[in-house]
Image (cartoon, grey):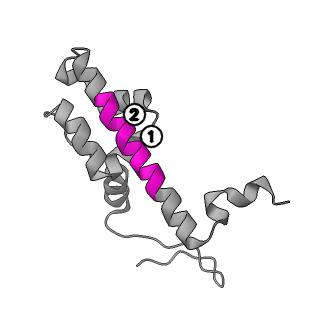
Amino acid sequence: MRSKNSYRPQNQHPDGLVQSRKQVAEQHYQQVRVTVQAMLRRGMKPQEITVPVVAKEAGVSVATIYRRADLFTIVQRGNPAIQREPHSHQAKARENAGGVHFRAQSHHTGTLRAR
């Protein structure tokens, strides 16, 4: 008898993993689409349709909506004024580092090396 864990996506062959991810992507697309459609039918004001609100109601993470252009476009149809947020945490890290990026500590010397 096979373990129930053997059916998890990360334990499948590459084809099964690809198929699983495609299914999840399609499921997220449908969840976001239906959620925005329902919000518009309810008569919500466009400015009330935001990524966090849609994410919470659709059961999809905010990061997933921002990361995938197709999902963000659906939200943007409900609220045309919404803008995609840049990766502000990466930009702030670069500003704070003064343009110098550090790698992990060297195993031999224990010092940081600049790129």
Image coordinates for residue 33, horizontal then vertical, percent: 30, 36
Image coordinates for residue 81, horizontal then vertical, percent: 14, 33
Residue drawn where x is 44% and y is 38% of the image? 60
Could you tell which of marks 1 and 2 lies nearer the N-terminus?
Answer: 2
Query: What secondary structure predominates along the stretch shown in magenta?
Result: helix
**Disc 2: CA contacts within 10 A as few (<14), some (14-19) or many (>=20):** many
Q: Which residues are magenta?
A: 22-36
Question: 7 or 92: which is nearer to us?
Answer: 7
Q: Decide if residue 84 is on the left or right side of residue 97.
A: left
Q: Look at label 1 and name its amino acid.
A: Ser
- From the viewer's perspective, is residue 113 above or below residue 17? below
Distance from Cα at disc 1 to Cα at disc 2: 6 Å
Q: Give the residue pinned by disc 1.
A: 61
* Residue positioned most to the bottom: 108
Element class at badge 2: helix
Image coordinates for residue 82, horizontal then vertical, percent: 19, 35
Element class at badge 1: loop
